[in-house]
Image (tube, grey):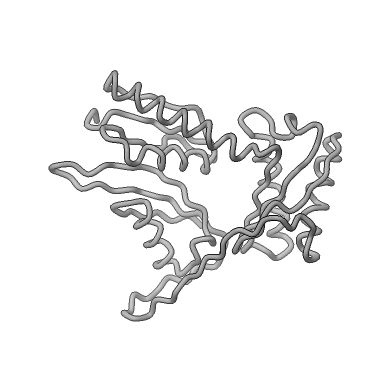
Amino acid sequence: MVYEFEGRTEKEAIDKAAEELNLDKDGFDVEILETHRSGLFKKGYVKIQVHTDQPVQVKSGEAGTETAVQRSQAVYGEPEAKNDFEQKLIDFVEGLIEHMGYGGRVSVLFRENHKIGLKIESEYSSILIGKKGKNLDALQLLVNIYAGRQGREDIRVILDSENYRIRREESLVRLAYTVADRVRENRGSILLEPMNPFDRRLIHTTLNDIAEVETKSEGEGLYKQVRVYYRGMR
């Protein structure tokens, strides 16, 4: 299911989504659609889109019915499977890359509330990651579908190899700042390459506090584009 929420800040919008959908914040994916900074004659706001496969029970809005949500921090350093479900995930990913014609070993990278990270170690990591991480994203999508078929729609699987996710994040942050400088200099707009929801959210979040710059997602489907534009040009 997909829902949209707005707030003065990203945190406020996410908090509103968690409260109204009665879900743990780890129970849904967030895509930032649009950010606007506050000004002299207008209030700032952030528009987000929430994706979740979990059953949603919208709260009635009665006062005093809020329940505290506790988020557990990620646990690292225990790479071996701790139960049958984790072993099935490992076997599934290893089977996938084997059918692709590449060898590799899969282990648990981290465990978090409603989330588990898997790490692929292979001499063919560059191929498994693919251009802009698209092969890794495809493998991640498949293993999440598999997890759902095992009755674990509540778990999101994050797949990584050679610390690609971290390196990609650092690269996108640098890109965001570079583009923001160009936009402020020429007072125009720049449309970035198509990105997955996680990468787009990183761009939006990085530029959320940059003066004179606003962002908006454009396009349809999973791989949309982020437009970075000079504030007020619209």
Residue 30 at least partly seen? yes
Above or below, 40 against 181 in this view is below
Q: Name the image quarter holding residue 181.
A: top left
Residue 218: x and y, percent? 42, 35
Above or below, 205 against 75 in this view is above
> Which one is nearer the viewer's eye here, 96 or 8?
8
Q: Which residue ends up furthest to the top in the rendered image?
A: 186
Q: Residue shown at 78%/66% (left/top)? A: 83
Q: Is residue 21 left or right of residue 81?
A: left
Above or below, 7 against 61 in this view is above
Residue 192: x and y, percent? 45, 27
Q: Residue shown at 43%/56% (left/top)? A: 3
> Which one is nearer the viewer's eye here, 89 or 107?
107
Q: Which residue ends up furthest to the front in the rendered image?
A: 77
Q: Residue shown at 59%/35% (left/top)? A: 167
Q: Is residue 153 left or right of residue 27?
A: right
Q: Which residue ends up furthest to the left in the rendered image?
A: 41
The quarter of the picture where the C terminus appears is top left
> Which one is nearer the viewer's eye here, 210 or 85?
210
Q: Is residue 136 left or right of residue 192?
A: right
Q: Residue shown at 13%/42% (left/top)? A: 40
Residue 154: x and y, percent? 62, 64
Residue 144 at least partly seen? no
Q: What is the number of callouts on the image?
A: 0
Q: Is residue 186 left or right of residue 43?
A: right
Residue 175: x and y, percent? 46, 28
